[in-house]
Amino acid sequence: MKALNDLDIFVRTADNGSLSATARALDLTPAAASAALKRLEAELGVPLFLRSTRSLRLTPHGERFLAQCRPALETLQQAGAQLAAGEQALKGVLKLSAPSDLGRNVLLPWLDEFQNAYPEVELRLQLSDRMANVYSDPVDAAFRYGKPPDSSLVALPLALENRRVLCAAPAYLARHGAPATPQALGAHACLCFMLGDEVNDRWRFAQAGAPAINVRVSSANVANDGDAVRRWALLGKGIAYKSGLDVADDLAQGRLQPLCTDWTTEAVPLFLVVPGRRQLTPLLRRLHAFIAQRCAQLLSSLT
C-alpha cells in the first residue's frame, strides 16, 4: 500500500534525520523517498520537514503528526503481518477423521473444493464410524455427530440443526407401501447401524404436544458402516433412519423419499472436534467456516 509506505518513510526519516539514510535502508533512490514525503505533505496540506542543503528537521506540524503517526503505523504494520502470517498458514497437512458415509459421499467433494481454493493443503483422511480419539490417534480434528461428552475437547458446531430422516427408496415403497406412523415400522424391514456390539434399533420420534417415543424396529440388515446402510436403502432393501446430511442429495434427486414427515426425528448435530484451543490453527478455522457454510446450504434443501 503506497500510503502505508509513505508513512513508513516519514517516520524513518524523522528518526534518522536523513532522507538519504532512509532511502538506503529501504533500497530506494533518494528521489523516490523525497517524492513520498512530498506526496504525504501534499495530502496533509502542511509541511512536515524544514529542509536545507545540510539539514532536515521536523516542523511543528511534523512533530505533532509524528506523535500520532508512529503508534498508528505500528498497529497497521502489525495487522498486515498477522494477516500475511494467517494466509501463509493456510498450507500444510490436515489430518482428519470422519464417519464413513458423511466422509465418502458429502465431505470428499467439499474437501476437493477446499483444496482447489488452497492448493498447498494436503489431506490425510481417515474414514471410519469408530469415533477417533483426537488425543491419541494421528488426527488434527474429527468430524463427529453429537457433542462429545469430554468437556476438555473443543467442539466447533458445523450443523446444529441436522436431524435424522426416516426414508426409503421408491422401489421399496412400491412393493411394501409407506408406514403411516412410526409405530407402523414394526411391519417393515428396517436397515440398522451397529457401533461395536450395539445395534441402533430404537428410533426416536416426537410430535407437538406429546411425549417422545422410542420405536423398536425389526432389523432386516445390520452394518457397522453407515455407507453400507445408505446403499442398502438405495437398493430398496428396507427403511433407513439416516442423518439428514448423509441423504440430503438422495432426497433431492428422488433416490430416497422421506417418511412420516409430520413427526420430529432425533437431532444429530455435527461438530468439528479438536483436542484444545491451541490446536485451532488458522487452517482449521478456515476449514471449519468452509464446511459449516456447505452444511447450511445442503440442509436448506431439506426444508
Image (spheres, rainbow, N blue to C red):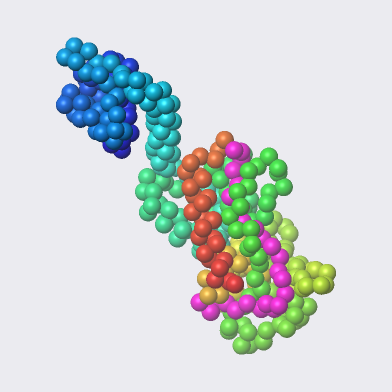
Residue 265 among magenta residues? yes
Residue 155 location, x and y as percent?
Answer: 63, 47
Q: Main secondary structure of the magenta part?
A: loop
**Of the pair 104 and 264, the residue shown nearer to us:** 264
Residue at position x 36%, y 48% in the image? 119
Residue 35 location, x and y as percent?
Answer: 20, 30
The stretch of residues the image draws in magenta is 253-277
Q: Is residue 63 visible?
A: yes
- Looking at the rendered image, the quarter that the N terminus falls into is top left
Residue 53 location, x and y as percent?
Answer: 16, 14
Q: Is residue 6 visible?
A: no
Residue at position x 83%, y 69% in the image? 211
Residue 242 among magenta residues? no
Using the rendered view, name the quadrant where residue 78 is placed.
top left
Residue at position x 59%, y 38% in the image? 277
Q: Is residue 277 above or below residue 289?
A: above
Q: Is residue 281 above or below residue 230?
A: above
- Looking at the rendered image, the quarter that the C terminus falls into is bottom right
Left or right of 120 in this view: 230: right
In the picture as drawn, the residue positioned furthest to the top comes out as: 54
